Amino acid sequence: MANANARTSADPDGVTGVDLAELIALRARAGKPVIHPMRRQVPFAGGHVSALRGRGMDYAESRIYQAGDDSRNIDWRRTARSGKWHTKVFQAEREHALLLLCDNHATMRFGTRIRYKSVAAARVAAWLAWTCVGGGDRVGAMAFGSLAAAVDPQAGIRGALAVLGALARWDARCRDADARGESLSTALLRARRMAAPGSQVWLLSDGWCADPASTQSLVRLARHVDLRVVILVDALEDALAPAGSYLFETASGKKRVDASTAAARAALRESLARGWRGLANACDDACVQWTKFATTDEPDELLPRFWRRQAGSRHA
């Protein structure tokens, strides 16, 4: 069980620090890619079809021939049956990309069950990365908070490993960082510049970085991409803690909290839940899909259904 106090050990134990080997091993548990009904595997092309019409590999429809149409695409059978010239129209393919927005604020380095929220977020990101490249798409990542960094989207195993390696490096660099960092609205602005229109963006955060401008920033980003939010929560932030005394390490030093009474336990939960509830409310106001992910959860058990949820639905 991870302690509420931050550990100073630099060992990537998979509990308080991101273990790269563990992230790589999650490849064996990657999910089944979401496949469009018209999807077709084509060399040197993306696996997803767009609403665009043009030169591509998948036949879409036949229509009346128009001046300027390529004569090589004439639909001879339809022309012969109807007596009018028809041309074939093909579905243009577009490669999809997944961008992972990884919160590395100091609040993420906290956990009382199994692992820190930061480690749980890295495992979520790894599962998503492996699932994404398994479908033939590209994956990239952007860190925000105590550290600002990014990995451009790449395809295949190389793309996944680039993201996983970055997650481990970012975690190691942020362990001794202070509590200050950029706001969520500022990070979302950076993400909007980095994410290609129509791509999928997943925000992984515990919500403590949310600011008053977050809702509008979520709205603006969701206009251009398929935006999903995974809110990392610890047991103490989501349920009443067992009666007792708790020692927390904060930016201002260590603080002991007496939670021996029911009222004190409820007050502790309300105080610790402000982060994730604030982000959840911002997502609801922006009509952005979100789900909670506890430090005890496994990505391959919780995320597949959320991955496949249709746009416009609320939280899982």
Image (tube, helix red, strand yellow):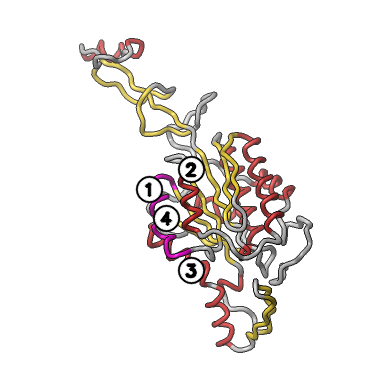
Q: Secondary structure at mark 3?
A: helix
Q: Specify start and end residues of the magenta stretch as a single range.
A: 211-226
Report the amino acid beneath label 1.
Arg
Three-letter amino acid code at the position of disc 4: Ser
Q: Secondary structure at mark 2?
A: loop
What kind of residue is marked 2?
A: Ala
Q: Is residue 160 magenta?
A: no
Q: Amino acid at mark 3?
A: Arg
Distance from Cα at disc 1 to Cα at disc 3: 23 Å
Separation of marks 4 and 1 at Cα, in angstroms: 10 Å
Mark positioned earlier in the residue sequence (1 or 3):
1
> Tag 3: Cα neighbours inside 10 Å, few (<14), some, or many (≥20)?
many
Work out whether 258 lies above or below 35. below
Q: Which residue is mark 3?
A: 277
Kindly identify which residue carries mark 2: 195
* Label placed on residue 217: 4
Residue carrying label 1: 223
In the rendered structure, which disc, 4 or 2, sits on the residue that comes first in sequence? 2
Q: Nearer the viewer, residue 164 or 251?
A: 251
**Element assignment for label 1:** loop
Residue sitting at 57 percent across and 54 percent down?
A: 144
Query: Residue 148: horizontal and vertical position, in percent?
Result: 59, 51
Distance Cα–Cα, label 4 vs label 2: 14 Å
Q: Is residue 137 left or right of residue 28?
A: left
Disc 1 to disc 3: CB gap under 8 Å: no
The x and y percentages for residue 194 are 50, 43
Image marks 2 and 1: residues in contact by CB distance under 8 Å: no
Q: How many marks?
A: 4
